[in-house]
Structures are given as structure tokens and as C-alpha cells.
Amino acid sequence: MVFVATIVVIVLFAVWGTAAPEQLAAFANQAYQFSIQNFGWFYLMATLFFLVFSLYLAFSKFGNIRLGDDEPEYSLISWFAMLFSAGMGIGLIFWGVAEPLSHYLTPPEGVAGRTTEAARLAMRYSFFHWGLHPWAVYTVIALTLAYFQFRKGYKGLISSAFVPLLGEKAVKGIAGQAIDMLAVIATVFGVATSLGLGALQINGGLRFLFGIPNTVAVQILIIAVVTVLFLVSATTGLDRGIKTLSNSNLIVAVVLMLFVWVTGPSAFIFDTLTTTLGSYLQNVINMSLRLTPFSKGTWVGEWTLFYWAWWIAWAPFVGSFIARVSKGRTIKEFILGVLLVPSAFGFIWFSVFGGTGLHLELFDRLELADSVKQDMTTALFVALKQLPLGTVIVSIATLLIITFFITSADSATFVLGMFTSKGNLNPGTGIKITWGVLQSSIAVVLLLSGGLSGLQTASIAAALPFAAILLGMCVSLLKSLREEDKIRRAEEKRLRRRLKRLLEKDEPVPE
């Protein structure tokens, strides 16, 4: 039912986007603006709660609970590589230069653009938008799913996490199916729009390198090639396909980052990382709850709330994939690994690429910010072109974007296969291919009709109800953990009493 119903809904949206793209965009924008204007406070409070809740669990008495009886399936490096590639690898590449320069031009309310203070805030908010908070969203959903799958033996579905709250009967009924349908639709919308937007970004890199024009025909060809590649990867299985690609992506990304660090303004990058990290940690609570109700400013809604909604909309896909590859980790190890390691990598990444971009703008007078304003897809390429071996590095960056997109799409087909095959942790090849072809087809149709932005906004608007689902998952997880701890303590008490009776009878204690 979930498989058929979601396909019907998705096809109807695709037809709407094809027949009336402007109407779809208008409707989606109204829904998104309604959620941001009326529930912006809810996004901020919920996301901060996810961060606090994650840290609490990591250092609580539940931290030593293992997610399954076996040892971890994957090494730490492969595990980090897979969760990073699925989580936001492609986003860091695209926004590493573009976001700090965008904030430098248009900083938060109260600060003038193109100033030293604007540069400081640009780096701090880049850390904020890509640091602990988004990974806390992923941590909450991934931990909950991993716990109920590997600790309790439930199916790999979002709805399974609600058994302690709603009961098994309700989860198998309409309520559970509605939760799983929302997760599938959010995943398909997010991945389909990312494929379309990714094609635009790749086309921008190819134009920068080879002068290939930005046309819909080229972008459709890019989607076709990427689709074939990620379907080949999907059919090779989790261990060979996604794992191999993720490891390769991480190696290339680290090499690219180190090259820019060494050949770019190294001392400036070190200084930027140090001072921005201090500023971020000092102001993290203030930024977490910052709204502008008295001035009716729009910056927070356009950036922070947009990001929080985007991360929540992507949470079903990324969280499910992270849960799948995290069997055998303890809760503390899981949380610290998912929350801290990718965040730290993101801080370094933005310091290297964003710091290089700001240095080119502030001290080399390159006017890179104006290039970003004109075409954001070329920000990274323009910055890299200024370094030694610029053309070679731009080529590597473009290839990295392509491989990250393949990994993300591959991971998405895997998760969609799980969601629509009753939580099977190893979905069949046929169902993965079906979802891969379907999401690419939707991307092509909407790219042709111009309805891509409408679908993207619609997927973000779906974040509001899913934020409530995430909060429910937190309550359900905590309830189950407390029940397990209560059973454990009762069993320990029973064993102590038995031991005491044996000692009082002066009988030998059995081994």
C-alpha cells in the first residue's frame, strides 16, 4: 500500500509540475511561507532540543547500550565516509565558498555588508548552518531507527519507532502507513530536486572548464549519465557500491581540502578556523534561538529556518541510511561519531574554502562576491582557478561533485527500497532500480517544465509535520530506553537476592 500510494502521489505532483509549474511553485511557496512565518519558533526550538537530547543520551546511563548484539559491520573510516557522503558531502562542496561570500554581501540584520564584521558573521553562520544542529537532526532519527531495528528487532521503517507510543496494531494500520508515506514522499522529492539542481551545478562546472553551454538538453544528458552510474552502484550492493564510492569520495575531498589549505592563504585559514570556532561556541545558544519579531527581518527565515526545514525534510533518507550502516555501535559511540566528527570536518572545510574565498575578496581584491551574486554555481570554480594548477583542481572538484551525487542517489534508492519493502534491510535490486528510474524521470520532467523549484519548496514545506514526528520518535526512544533499564535493574536485583540466599544457606555458588 505504501509503495503504490506514494507512487500515485509522486506522479500526480510530477504531472502538476509539468502542466502548471508556476501554479505548483506558488502553492508550494505559500505552504512554505506559512510554516516559516507561523512556526519558525517551532523549528528553532525543536532543532535545539534535538542537539541537547543527543548530548544527554551520549553521556547518560544509556550510553553503553549497544545497537545490536554484534560488533560494528564497518570500520570507523568507512562508517564516517558513508554517513558523510549521504549526509551533506555535496552541499559542502557547493556552499563551501558560496555561503560565506553570500553572508558577506548580505549579513544578518544590524550589520552592514562588505565589512570586516560581515566577514566574521559570514563564517560564524556558515559553521552554524552546517555544524552541530543539522547533524543533531540526523542523529536523533538515525539513533532511534538503529535502536529499534538492531536492539528490538523491529522493521526498518520510520513507523516502527512508534510501537512503544502507539502500539503495534496502530503502527501496522493507517497511522503507521501515513508516517511511512510521508517519509517516502519527502525522500523522493528531496532526491529528485537534488538530481535536477545537481545537474545545473555540474553543467556550471563543465561550462567553466570546457565552455559547454547551460542548456536543458545538457542537463538531461547529465541526469541520464548519473542515473546509469548510480544504478550500477546500487546493483552491486551496500558493501561494494556505496562503501567503495564513499571511501573514494572522502579521500578525494580530503586531498582537495589539503591542497587548497597548503597552496592558499594557510595562515589566514588557521586564524579563521580558530577565531570562528571560538565565536561559534560562544554564541551558539543565541544563534539557535534568534528571531527578529520586532523588526520583521527576513534573513533568519531565508537562511537559518530554510536550512532547518531542509535538514528535517532530508532526515528520513539520511537518518535511515546512517542507521543501516551503524549496527554494533554503542549509543555513546554512535552519537559522538555522527554528531561531532562530521561537524568538525565541516568547520575545517568552511575555514579552508570559505576562508580562501573571503581572503580573495578582502585582500586580493578579486571581487569574488560579485561573481557569486551573478552565478552561485561558479563560486567554487572561480576561487579554485586562482590557485596553482587551477584548471586541474577545478576538474577534480567537478568530478567530486559528480561522485557525491552518485553516492547520494545510490543511498536514496537503497532507503526507498527499504521503506517500500516492509523495512527489508537489504531490498531487492528490482525495487531499487524502480525508484532510481522514477526519481530521475521526475527530475527530468520538472527540469523541462521549470517546476523544479516548486517541488523543492514543497519538500521543505513537508518538514513541519515531520518535525513533529521526530519529536515523537525522541519520546518513544526515551520511553523504550527507560523500560529496558528498568528491566535490567530488576534482573540485577533478582540475581543479587538469589546470591544472598545462596550465601545465607552457606551453599557453594554455581558457576
Image (cartoon, rainbow, N blue to C red):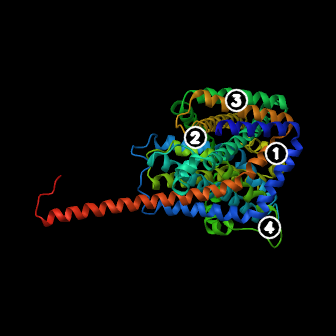
Q: Nearer the viewer, mark 4 or mark 3?
A: 3
Measured in 3D between alpha carbons, the distance from the residue under mark 3 to the one under mark 1, in whole angstroms, is: 21 Å
Report the residue marked by disc 1: 454
Please identify the quarter of the rendering in which residue 474 is found.
bottom right
**Which is nearer the eye, 132 or 24?**
24
Q: Secondary structure at mark 2?
A: helix
Measured in 3D between alpha carbons, the distance from the residue under mark 4 to the one under mark 2, in whole angstroms, is: 36 Å
Report the residue marked by disc 4: 111
Q: Is residue 410 left or right of residue 70?
A: right
Q: Secondary structure at mark 4?
A: loop
**Which is nearer the eye, 274 or 329?**
329
**Residue type at tag 3:** Val
Q: Could you tell which of marks 4 and 3 lies nearer the N-terminus? A: 4
The answer to whether mark 3 and mark 1 are in CB contact below 8 A is no
Report the residue marked by disc 3: 437
Give x and y (percent) for residue 284. 64, 66
Q: Could you tell which of marks 2 and 3 lies nearer the N-terminus? A: 2
Report the residue marked by disc 2: 250
